[in-house]
Image (spheres, helix red, strand yellow):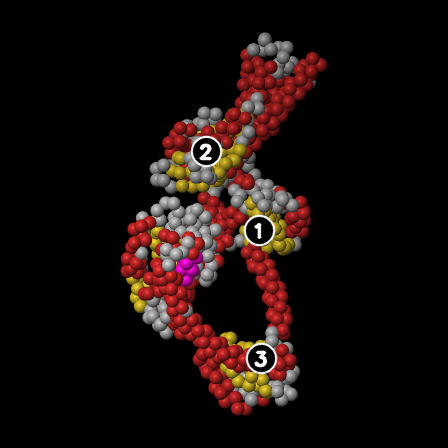
Amino acid sequence: MSLIRELGLPSPQTIGNIATTLLLVMIALLLSLLFSNMIYATPFAFFYGAVALVAFMAGLAAGLAATSLSILVVELVLIPPIGQFGTSSGNFSHLIIFASVAILISWLNHARLTTLRQSVRRHDELQALLTHIDDAVTAQDEQGQVMFANKAAAVLTGYPSVEAMIGLSAAAAQRRFTLFGEDGQPLPYDCLPRTRVFQEGVGGTIRFKLRYLDDGSEKWVHLSTAPLLDETGKPRLAVNIFRDITESVDAQYRLRQILDNLPALVGMLDLDGNVIEVNLPALALANLKREDVMGKPFADLYPLSYDPGVQTRMREAIAQVKNGEIVRFDVDIRVGEGQFATIDFILSPIRDEEGHIYALLPSAVDITQRRRIELERETLSAEVESQRKRLESILARVPGLVWEGAGKPDGTQKILYVNRYAQDMLGYPVERWYADPPIWSEIVVPEDMPQAAEQAMNIFTGAETGVMEFRMKARDGRIIPVESYAAIVQRGVDDQSTRVCGVIMDVSQRKRGEALLKRYMTRLKNSNDELKQFAYVASHDLQEPLRMISSYLQLIESRYQDKLDQDGKDFIHYAVDGSNRMKRLIQDLLLYSRVETRKGLYTSVDMNTVLGEVRRNLEITIAQTGTLIHAEALPEITADHGQMVQLLQNLISNAIKFRSEDPPEITITAERVSGAWQFAIRDNGIGIDAKYQERIFIIFQRLHGHGKYTGTGIGLAICKRVVERHGGHIWVTSQPGSGATFYFTVADHLKNGSEEDDA
């Protein structure tokens, strides 16, 4: 071809067009000669066909050449005079019509060929484009049969060639693949956009996971489908464009994993402020789902919609960031009904490689806890400052010298704090204490200094707390006895950084009071001893006159019984009864006084044994009254055995004495309480009114007259003294008519020679 061009020779196509033109014109001439009688009126009849065929086959130039050659041949051969040019007016009109029609036919065929060539070229170009693009393209009819597929489609679906895909049915695809939606659930083929193409005439997009049934491999695919319409506007084919987005989805998945595991709230907005991405912490904070926020205006979301002011602030921030700014502020967001959280909110622009803003990045950190801590810290700081001022005010009014120092108490100890009372107490100004560490050697009386220094050093080196007594010398010369309480505040890395605090109290008044109290206690002890001796002697010696009075009255009654009238006998009876009651009263008083003066030892006492002794002592009374006594296993305690018998016997006797109409029933139990045994004696007697339940333990207090119940009113007072001597206490709970329960406790670890025994 290049050689032909270099020699200037016509191309084979041109030669072929010339030959075609000559051949068809000659054929038209031959036909015209054969049928000359039939076409005499229209000599160009066959030449119309020749020109049309030439133009159809060879194009416009060949058609024009055929037109010119046909006119020449007709003029020379068919129109008289034969062999000469020039025609009559009638033949000339035929010539003009032929030329016009031939030229039109040639042009129309040329336009058709041009359009056909362009269509073929476009088809070839489209075919090449579809063949070489990376996206898979198919076309399906309404039944799902594949009418077209490119090479990428064959690769994506795993078919060996495009030809193997043409004509495949939808059922064949279903046997080859399984589809899954983004939620992981199987996706029916009817949900693909192809269904909408033929039902509604519109396309659509969808993203799904394609699983190959032969090997189980998977790919993520983005499918975009559009209708191809026929002449009537109805869908003829559904054109599918598949894009393998596996890498993109994996990258998005990894990115989402990163975002979802960030300890921050992160999202993405488009330039209109609509949410296009959000991570799980942001959703979880407000208890939302992704579908609740995606595609919605950020400022209208649930966490922000509670307050128009907050929404306005967000819209203003979006406008600022669209202009390239970065906005940051704290804001309260709603995380539940009536519940709010505080976030540190940042909104910044996202730029492309050319620096253009194409999205917005909202991020936040939940600072609710931090804000709460800050508020608590502020509150605490205010409280500390208030307490500091309050403490300062209190310390200024404490009637003692309060101090804090650092270092050894060897004369070099530095004073860090001293209250204002130091000046009131000793006369030295506060500033002097701060400026003069050796002030201790000046204010402590020299005779007391060695002992005070030794005690202070003992506290400093080991004890950490201690009390010292020494004397101090005031600025005006007064000698003040003091008591010093010192303690280690904080051990330092060395002696000089160890901090010590203390309180020095002026005990002058207390010393005087102690001296007076000591003298008073001595006199009181002597007086108490004398009173105890007097009570013992009086109660013991008074019984002899009473016995004599009672004996002589009984002797008179026996000897002069016949000479006495009834009044005389009654008078003697009353006198004897009074004498006997006086005797019992004196005996009970003597017993009461012996509770404290008793020198019995505390031993291990089995309360079951004690109860057995009480039963034997009260055997006749129990039998006469029909009393029932129930007792669980009682403990072994440390106590005075004799007084335990006395205590239990008094309480059981009272329960029998103050019985109701029913036979007495008494229950005795014991249980452990903190550091003691607690006993309970319950009865079904007449009960005690609440207003008398404290009074009954006072000596000589009786609730009933002598005519109904005997006794002196000392029994429960004796019980109280016995219980108190054993480190416990006694009380009663009762309602009139519902019986009573007496409780008493006995402390653990009682020791012989205690203060109770020595009193």
Identify residue type, mark 3: Gln
Residue at image point 57% right, 51% down:
341
Q: Quadrant of residue 64?
A: top right
Q: What residue sits 63% from the left and 71% below the top?
A: 393
Q: Position of residue 147 (x, y in %)?
A: 46, 29
Residues in magenta, as a range: 571-579
Q: Label 3: how many residues lie within 10 Å, few (<14), some (14-19) or many (20+)? A: few
For label 1, the crowd category at 10 Å Cα-Cα, with few meaning under 14, some 14 to 19 and many 20 or more, is some
- At horizontal 56% and vertical 59% (from top left) the residue drawn is 373
Q: Which disc, if any, is residue 509?
A: 3
| Label annotation for residue 442 | none
Q: Residue 321 versus residue 44: which sits nearer the camera?
A: 321
Residue at image mark 1: 341
Residue to which mark 2 is pinned: 149
Question: Within the magenta stretch, is there residue 575?
Answer: yes
Q: Reply above or below: 484 against 141.
A: below
**Earlier along the polypeptide chain: callout 3 or callout 2?**
2
Marks 3 and 1 sit apart, C-alpha to C-alpha, by 61 Å
**Foreground: 653 or 411?**
653
Task: State which quarter of the image contains the C terminus.
Answer: bottom left
Q: Secondary structure at mark 2?
A: strand
- Locate residue 184, reporting x and y percent: 43, 39
The amino acid sitting under disc 1 is Ala
* Label 2: few (<14), some (14–19) or many (≥20) C-alpha neighbours in 10 Å: many
Residue lying at the far top of the rendered structure: 37
Direction from residue 425 to residue 284 in the image, left or right: left
Residue 100 drawn at (x, y percent)? 66, 20
